[in-house]
Amino acid sequence: MKRRKLGVIGFVALLAGVTFVLGAFALSNASDTYLSDFEAQYPAAVGTRIDSCLMCHNVIPGSSARNAYGAAWASNGHNFTANNFEQADSDGDGFTNLAEITARFFPGNAADHPATGDTTLPTVTNFAIPATATSLTISVTTFTASDNVLVTGYLVNESATKPLASAAGWSATAPTSFTFSTAGSKTLFAWAKDAAGNVSASVSDSTIITLATPVIPFDGSGDGGSGCFIATAAFGSYVSPYVRVLRNFRDTFLMTSRVGRAFVTWYYRVSPPIADTIAQRSVARAVIRAGLLPLIGFSAIALAIGLIPTLFMCLLFLAGIVIGAIKMQSLRRTLRVV
């Protein structure tokens, strides 16, 4: 009887031990998974002081009770961004969760936070872009900044007005490129910010963007580049919205018929030298632009409602002009007789 009792006690102890080990393994594995989720969401924090189970727990190992951030994150469905979670202040220390993570502080520890009353501005120490470019997207060759605590954001834009720390466009790492909307002489301004919301003075650099106008031989497919040589020369760029309308008209209507393709082939053969002459004379460009406007308008309407309805509208318009001219002529003869 005594042996049986000892055997039962031993079995229960073994079962409890196995349960403890499996439970500890499950908790450890869950903690590792959650930490991996954190690293995936905030890659800049990997390898830093906050890249540990202390992000969500009071002490290591992670099987201990959750801190304020860990409990709030669990209540939020383990989602870092839903319900504006990043802008919440889980530990109530006056800094948002995102601000503390960006500055490498624990958002679940009220005693661990960026320095309060920090008024020291970050400094953009170096910023450079190429002096010239042939594309609207240019590379940012150098962008470095420093701060008395930590630089938490970088921004480049075309405005000399200091942006707010909450403005759109800030990134955790220095951008490596910037895209302008137009060509020409451009100035780019670089800014940096810290966790306290201080924004640096700007450092600027300038570039001159000259877009090349490629002359691509027509291959009969209708998709080998612009091809609208005269319009491109007149408007200065094959990406001009006016040239795009003509190009879309060509591809939609001309390239879908034998007669249209024949016309396009002839145009591609004779227009390049004419376009070269137009491109070299500003007066010629202005005259051609004005002359192309009716054709661009016709093309835009045709693309919107169809070629046949547009032709019908044009015929009605011309008929109205002819009838009006006849009426005017008849009226003049009547007045002469009187």
Image (cartoon, rainbow, N blue to C red):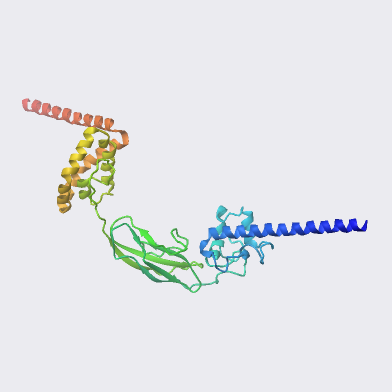
Q: Is residue 71 visible?
A: no
Of 316 and 302, the residue lying toward us: 302
Residue 187, picture quadrant: bottom left
Q: Is residue 79 visible?
A: yes
| Image position, residue 239 (x, y; %) | 28, 49
The answer to whether residue 84 is above or below residue 313 is: below
Residue at (45, 60) in percent of width and height: 167
Specify whether 285 is left or right of 44. Answer: left
| Image position, residue 249 (x, y; %) | 27, 39
Label count reads 0
Quarter occupied by the C terminus:
top left
Residue at (54, 58) in percent of width and height: 40
The answer to whether residue 117 is above or below residue 248 is: below
Of 302 and 222, the residue lying toward us: 222
The answer to whether residue 117 is above or below residue 304 is: below
| Image position, residue 286 (x, y; %) | 18, 49
Quarter occupied by the N terminus:
bottom right
- Residue that lies at the very extreme toward the front in this rendered image: 3
Residue 185, picture quadrant: bottom left
